[in-house]
Image (spheres, rainbow, N blue to C red):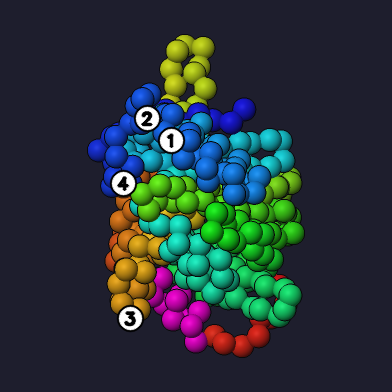
Amino acid sequence: MPAVLRHPHPRNHGGAPGGTGGIVRPRFWGLLLAMAGCALAHAGQPAADLHARYLALQDRLNDNAFQRPLFLDSNETVKSLRGEVFAVIARPFATVRPSLQDIGPWCDILILHLNVKGCRATVTPPTQTLRMNFGRKHEEPLAQAYPVDFDFRVAAADDSYLQVLLRADTGPMGSRNYRIELEAVPLPDGRTFLHLSYAYEYGFAVRLAMKGYLATLGSGKVGFSMADRQPDGTAGLITGVRGVVERNTMRYYLAIEAYLGSLAVPPADRLEQRLHGWFAATERFSRQLHEIDESAYLKMKRQEVLRQQTDAGPVPPA
């Protein structure tokens, strides 16, 4: 069963307001639905579905422990994990869509994640590929990181809806079917509703490695959702592999936020804006996301970005 986010973190760790104003009161529902109906009359079914999800999540978006219009969910099966973030961002769709529909900016986004040690985009029409190298949360040579090739595809991009799909058939230790999917629709008052999902499947080797990690370095780490209440009445934040996928989904979402936020400054200042912005955003959820201090993060990522910018050769075989 998917987790339901209640109060994942003390409220003093919530993020900055997202520009949604107060809770939508009943007398405004008619107007809101009418406005949505007008927009959906000209939108395709995926856009209509995402607008409907926005309306269905109003309570969770307006009242949550994040103190911002954001809802996080996760799901675990015997062989797969999936995390999702739904959020309202105070940026117009006319800015969000062109910023995320091209492959170029995605390496600037993904490299912000601690475990992404390198990223390179290759375009050979009609194929677009993102080579992501996954490694440890600390400095290491790129040769020691694991390369994964993601097929990059823009499934839809118009004035009413954006959908970007990243798919990889295989990953480390026999993991497979990696999917990073983003979709977005415009909202009134210059805002955008965004949905990001991150999922993959795994087998025995990954399950065994994850068990070892959670028993040692990952012990005590938690996610954002509340775990099921125990027979004695106690409950806490989710742990285990669902905690892992929730933390990584949030890191990817905050990377998108940091990238969009950097567009407001001159190009020469955008890298530093992204790096400082991503780290500050993760520290708002320090119980879940803190791994290294800011100086170590900045030093590591500056080196990785420089390596990424100077390595202009063809993508070698994975």
Residue on which the image places disc 3: 268
Distance between the Cα atoms at labels 4 and 2? 17 Å
Residue on which the image places disc 4: 19
**Label 4 environment density (alpha carbons within 10 Å; few <14, some 14–19, many ≥20):** some
Picture disc at residue 306: none
Q: What residue do we see at 58% from left, 61% from top?
A: 158
Q: Is residue 17 above or below residue 259?
A: above
Residue on which the image places disc 2: 28
Earlier residue among tags 4 and 2: 4
**Helix, strand or loop for disc 2:** helix
In the image, is residue 153 part of the stretch drawn in magenta? no
Q: Quick check: 315 left or right of 246?
A: right
**Helix, strand or loop for disc 3:** helix
**Helix, strand or loop for disc 1:** helix
Tell me the magenta residue range. Answer: 299-310
- Nearest to viewer (mark 4 / mark 3): 4
